[in-house]
Image (cartoon, coloured by chain):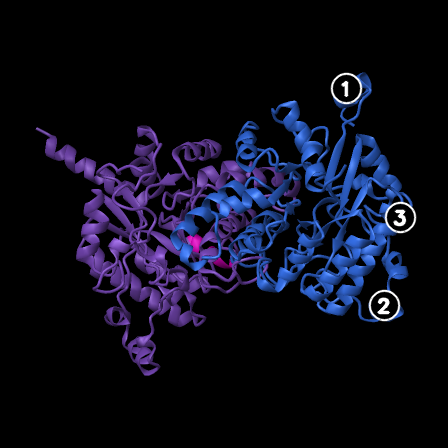
């Protein structure tokens, strides 16, 4: 493990909503009254995938007596940003509203979360950017929320959970991808499930640890869904960022889809070139957690992917993926570290790129005689 | 036949000698099984037919690709489906390429996915009789797999004990990996006890009919491309379940053959299981080794469909990680993605490694003399 260079771009950090009380000011009068009347304002909206007590949900030294890890901006600044010398970080708020069946309530609560993150976090911390949280099952409402938030350039991507009603490439969700493409927003897909379906093809496993391990095949099926449905041909500007997904499974996916494509291409004629090439152009993964057990294996995996452009630096704060400040796995070359921590994030997020260009222009102006 | 191959065979006058771990025999029609069913179940089959967890009968909701998923040349000229004609199988595959032993995986009309448990038991019993009398008795290179309906462990145990005592040609037990619960759950343990007791192997092969669950927690796909991918990704759930539930602590002699499941995903699953287990090990205190150690010790992988990296040398990493003593050749005859034993292992390896994959590993696992 090694330290991350100062000035890195962290593509997955998690501020946490401290409780419904924090969201109430960001809801309109109808929802405030309605939620209070049903006592829903007292509900935790905690995703089972990230129940606060689970070991992976917060590193022991990042747990706080003051409430849920990630819920206090001062602590967050010190632990998630200052500690790593982070230049920019993308806030992904994992909030349980997306697991509701009531589309209207889910949409209202997601909008409240987006308002909350803009007012309470982005307004106070210039190093932070955020993802637009949407509940995808009503894609029209989700697309409307993207339109509502996209004017604020500090929102840099759309945030979805990897397991919902349907594999995410499904055409039901296309209004989301149309809106995201229009605004230059990558689709961030984060680990986690609304448990509409059992996590395995054979039903419900016993242990939390199984749910965590099985995020990986869910990401695989999701990438294959985007490929098979032709999302990248319909919306060629689409970038997927798979977050907290691990990525050691990616080579096997590329090989299997390359081979099966030769047999199934008449069924999915829009796939016009080997799937592995499409993956390299459109799919990105955040660094943590690193499944490869050591630097040698990690470098073999990167070699198998045949690209140094796919991995984006992340700490996954406050989730427990590593200890101390060594957020980078051992064995990466200096050139690869530069790609992962700066170049790849800038290449992936148009809105971060715009920021960086503006920064450079300002520096040039200051330096001008 | 490939011309260069034909010439090489003519020159050397030698054929390969191989063990095939995946051959699919199919009844020519339901009549084939009638001699092995009682009047009660013959009448039931005629009146009520199968009762399974999908919307269509007599076809799959994800239709297969070319020729209904079969080698187009494997349809017998005298009628019936591919895989129903021993003479054709011998001519196209067993004799043609020098098969010394072939393992039957009987999926069709096998009762594994039947909701009426007693009917499922009757079908499984019949298909096991049929394998013995219509196949093994006619070609002693063929070895049978005891098919059992996994949702009816009480019957399964009796059937396993009886078949193992009846004929040494029964070398493994086949159950559906698309079960109602992940295969490591307590419900299925009597089956593993019976397998271990009788020195058999547990063979897992993808099944077209689901146990009511989509291949992963992402939900149902749209295209056969996705379903086909799920034949690999959905196995992670069962591997994780068998390991995390402690099945191999309880039944240390249990060995699992992964048939047509893909294999390049296995190393990364092992790394991921280890990492998550380290973080959560108090949840599964019954495990006394790292999960990847159980994976390495108890699982064998069949080669078909052979993965095809853009750089074939990358397969050597995968074989190194899984273990050259754990990979076994399989053809999947008569299915459309049949792997020809002469060309399937198309990457650099030593003659000893090739021999291990083509025959030695299967000989050892299945105790062929």
Q: Which residues are magenta?
A: A172-178
What shade has chain A been given? Answer: purple
Marks 3 and 1: in contact by CB < 8 Å? no
Task: Determine the residue positioned at 65% across, 57% down.
Answer: B193
SS of the residue under disc 1: helix
Task: Determine the residue positioned at 36% across, 43% down.
Answer: A287
Q: Which residue is mark 3?
A: B79
* Of the image marks 2 and 1, the number of the one nearer the N terminus: 1
Dot 1, how many residues are within 10 Å of its Cα: few (below 14), some (14-19), or many (20+)?
few
Give the numbered dot on residue B8. 1
The chain carrying label 1 is B
Quarter occupied by the N terminus of chain B: top right
Give the numbered dot on residue B305. none
* Of the image marks 3 and 2, the number of the one nearer the N terminus: 2
What shade has chain B been given? Answer: blue
The residues tagged by marks 1 and 3 sit, at their Cα atoms, a distance apart of 34 Å
* Of the image marks 1 and 3, the number of the one nearer the N terminus: 1
Q: Which residue is mark 2?
A: B46
Question: What predominant SS class does the magenta segment belong to?
Answer: helix
Left or right of A86? Residue A294 is: right
Task: Determine the residue positioned at 66% across, 45% down.
Answer: B259
* Residue A14 image position (x, y, % from top left): 30, 55
Foreground label between 1 and 3: 1
Tell whether position B335 is magenta: no
The chain carrying label 3 is B
Tell whether position A175 is magenta: yes
Left or right of A167? Residue B83 is: right
């Amino acid at each position: 493990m090694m330290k991350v260079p100062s000035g890195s771009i962290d593509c997955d950090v998690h501020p946490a909503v401290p409780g419904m009380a924090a969201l109430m000011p960001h809801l309109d009068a109808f929802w405030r009254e309605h939620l209070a009347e049903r006592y829903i304002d007292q509900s935790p909206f905690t995703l089972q995938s990230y129940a606060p007590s689970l070991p992976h949900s917060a590193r022991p030294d990042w747990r706080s007596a003051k409430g849920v890890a990630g819920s206090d901006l001062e602590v967050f600044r010190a632990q998630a940003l200052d500690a790593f010398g982070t230049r920019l970080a993308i806030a992904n708020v994992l909030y349980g509203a997306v697991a509701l069946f009531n589309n209207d309530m889910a949409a209202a609560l997601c909008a409240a979360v987006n308002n909350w993150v803009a007012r309470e976090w982005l307004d106070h911390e210039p190093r932070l950017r955020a993802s637009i949280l949407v509940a995808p099952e009503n894609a029209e409402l989700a697309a409307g929320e993207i339109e509502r938030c996209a004017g604020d350039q500090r929102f840099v991507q759309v945030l979805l959970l990897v397991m919902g009603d349907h594999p995410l490439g499904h055409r039901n969700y296309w209004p989301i991808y149309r809106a995201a493409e229009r605004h230059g927003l990558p689709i961030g897909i984060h680990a986690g499930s609304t448990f509409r379906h059992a996590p395995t093809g054979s039903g419900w496993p016993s242990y939390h640890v199984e749910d965590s391990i099985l995020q990986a095949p869910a990401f695989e099926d999701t990438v294959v869904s985007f490929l098979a449905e032709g999302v990248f041909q319909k919306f060629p500007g689409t970038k997927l960022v798979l977050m907290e997904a691990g990525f050691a499974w990616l080579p096997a996916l590329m090989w299997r889809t390359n081979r099966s494509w030769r047999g199934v291409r008449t069924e999915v004629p829009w796939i016009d070139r080997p799937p592995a090439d499409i993956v390299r152009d459109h799919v990105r993964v955040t660094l943590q957690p690193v499944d490869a057990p050591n630097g040698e294996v990690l470098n073999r995996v990167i070699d198998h992917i045949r690209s140094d452009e796919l991995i984006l630096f992340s700490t996954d704060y406050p989730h427990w993926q590593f200890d101390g400040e060594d957020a980078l796995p051992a064995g990466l070359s200096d050139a690869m570290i530069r790609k992962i921590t700066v170049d790849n994030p800038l290449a992936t997020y148009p809105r971060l790129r715009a920021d960086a260009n503006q920064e450079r222009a300002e520096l040039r102006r200051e330096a001008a005689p | 036949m490939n011309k260069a191959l034909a010439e090489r065979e003519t020159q050397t006058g030698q054929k390969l000698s191989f063990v095939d771990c995946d051959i699919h025999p199919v009844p020519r029609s339901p009549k084939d099984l009638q001699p092995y069913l009682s009047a009660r179940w013959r009448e039931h089959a005629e009146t009520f037919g199968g009762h399974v967890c999908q919307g269509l009968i007599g076809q799959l909701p994800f239709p297969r690709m070319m020729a209904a998923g079969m080698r187009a040349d494997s349809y017998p000229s005298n009628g019936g489906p591919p895989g129903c004609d021993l003479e054709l199988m011998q001519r196209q595959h067993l004799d043609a390429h020098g098969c010394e032993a072939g393992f039957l995986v009987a999926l069709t009309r096998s009762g594994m996915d039947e909701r009426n448990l007693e009917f499922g038991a009757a079908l499984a019993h019949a298909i096991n009789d049929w394998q013995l009398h219509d196949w093994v008795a006619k070609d002693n290179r063929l070895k049978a797999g005891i098919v059992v309906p996994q949702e009816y462990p009480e019957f399964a145990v009796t059937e396993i004990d009886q078949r193992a005592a009846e004929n040494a040609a029964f070398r493994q037990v086949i159950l559906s990996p698309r079960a109602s619960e992940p295969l490591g759950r307590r419900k299925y343990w009597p089956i593993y006890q019976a397998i271990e007791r009788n020195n058999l192997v547990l063979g897992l092969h993808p099944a077209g009919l689901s146990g009511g669950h989509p291949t992963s927690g992402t939900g149902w796909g749209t295209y056969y491309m996705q379903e086909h991918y799920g034949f690999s990704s959905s196995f992670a759930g069962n591997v994780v379940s068998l390991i995390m539930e402690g099945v191999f602590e309880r039944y240390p002699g249990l060995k699992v053959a992964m048939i047509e499941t893909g294999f390049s995903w296995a190393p990364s699953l092992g790394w991921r299981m280890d990492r998550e287990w380290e973080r959560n090990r108090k949840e599964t205190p019954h495990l006394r080794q790292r999960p990847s150690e159980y994976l390495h010790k108890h699982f064998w992988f069949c080669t078909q469909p052979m993965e095809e990296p853009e750089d074939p040398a990358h397969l050597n990493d995968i074989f190194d990680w899984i273990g050259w003593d754990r990979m076994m050749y399989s053809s999947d005859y008569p299915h459309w993605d049949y792997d020809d034993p002469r060309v399937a292992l198309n990457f650099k390896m030593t003659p000893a490694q090739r021999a291990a994959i083509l025959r030695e590993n299967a000989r050892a696992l299945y105790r062929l003399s």
